[in-house]
Image (cartoon, grey):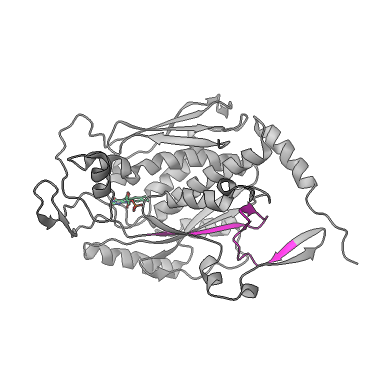
Amino acid sequence: MPALRFLTAGESHGPYLVGILDGLPAGLPLTEEHLLPRMQRRQGGYGRGKRMSIEGDRPQIVGGTWKGVTTGAPLAVLIENASNRQGRAQARKTVPRPGHADLAGVLKYGFDDANPVIERASARETAMRTALGAAACRLLEHFGVRLVGRVIEIGGVAAPPLAPDGTADAIEAARDASPVACCDAAASATMVARVDEAKERGETLGGRLELLVFGLPPGLGSYVQWDRKLDARLAQALMSIQSVKEVELGDALDAARNFGAAAHDVIRRAGEGLAREGNRAGGLEGGVTNGEPLVARVTLKPIATLRRPLPSVDLETGEETEGRYIRSDVMVVPAAAVIAEAMAALVLGDALVEKFGGDSVDDIAAALAHYRARLPRWPERP
Ligand SMILES: Cc1cc2nc3c(=O)[nH]c(=O)nc-3n(C[C@H](O)[C@H](O)[C@H](O)COP(=O)(O)O)c2cc1C
């Protein structure tokens, strides 16, 4: 059983989204205000549809804290849907959209209407994942771990690599100045133009995001059993985000095209400790954190609902027809970068509590200090 586990429930247009995060240690200051910045970032980003301007997305913490501090009891969170259509007449949807869950869901459950599929498969559910993930981020931040997601490509327009000495603060500041969460101003402007072009054509776009995690201690995760490998746990969490079709850890694609000497990070003595020449492994070796920043890149396919719908079949009549347009986003990679931070935080928070145990953040702090003290120390070289 994971140390930190969560579930979400609720429909896209039901009254509430519901979430429970179990295993959060006691003693962590946590209020709704801590969840809000990520909620707001998820709603923003150039290319989102009208729904995001309708929803307030103010999570309510209804369990697991006492006077603004976690108690060790399950964290319970509610988010009210402003766009609540429960009880209202809803036209049946019988023309599945290629690329969405409509057809697969209708076949799986035997529905004569895709509405129940759309209501749960939709990424509205990620509002709750973001809220719970923000609580996990808060836990990690308490131990000096910082997660930063940013957009690196939209519709084939790629951002140049980051400056190698960029701090988390500098990366966040550049990202937050961009309407598409891209740290490079020129690439950001070209990406915005690409989204405009997609809108004009009645089209949609996908892209890529990069997740950086700074301050992780080495030794999270394990190689001793397949389902304890942190790379695998992280890949599942990131892949579970709607539209995500590929997860790359470190420079995996580049490494696969090169010789080994160009792919791995040389180990050197550095003062009292160790240093790596480069971080092509992206902070993970053997399914275990190695002390370098974690780097994951995530690829999203273009949004499935096009204003100029793709051909499909009406499942009621059996006739080929044009798909139907439903209110939709055009491009969501900036929002996905926030959701990726949340999902990674839930996995990394789990790995942290798993390794350092304890019921309270003070217990974890003591175990972490003890562990850090036994990490390699050598005398300075002469
Ligand atoms: C933040 C976010 C918002 C999304 N908004 C839409 C949308 O408005 N319309 C749409 O067709 N798909 C949207 N998607 C993608 C679908 O939810 C997704 O394609 C669908 O559930 C099928 O899952 P799959 O693409 O992972 O196979 C969104 C995805 C994310 C991450």
Question: Which one is nearer the viewer's eye here, 234 or 86?
Answer: 234
Question: Which one is nearer the viewer's eye here, 379 or 251?
Answer: 251
Query: Is 155 on the left-hand or right-hand side of 148?
Result: left
Name the residue: 68% across, 49% down: 219
Quadrant where the image shows the N terminus: top right
Query: Is 75 on the left-hand or right-hand side of 316?
Result: right
Question: For residue 28, which quarter of the picture?
Answer: top right
Q: Residue furthest right?
A: 382
Q: Is residue 183 above or below residue 96?
A: below
Q: Is residue 143 above or below residue 29?
A: below
Q: Percent from the top left, x then y, of residue 225?
A: 60, 47
Q: Is residue 186 above or below residue 321?
A: below
Question: Is residue 355 found inside the magenta-colored segment of the image?
Answer: no
Question: For residue 78, which quarter of the picture?
Answer: top left
Q: Percent from the top left, x then y, of residue 135?
A: 52, 38
Name the residue: 58% across, 68% down: 163
Question: For residue 80, which quarter of the picture?
Answer: top left
Q: Percent from the top left, x then y, of residue 50?
A: 27, 48
Quadrant where the image shows the C terminus: bottom right
Name the residue: 32% across, 60% down: 302
Q: Residue furthest front?
A: 225
Q: Percent from the top left, x then y, of residue 211?
A: 52, 56
Query: Which region shows up in magenta?
Result: 275-300
Q: How many marks?
A: 0
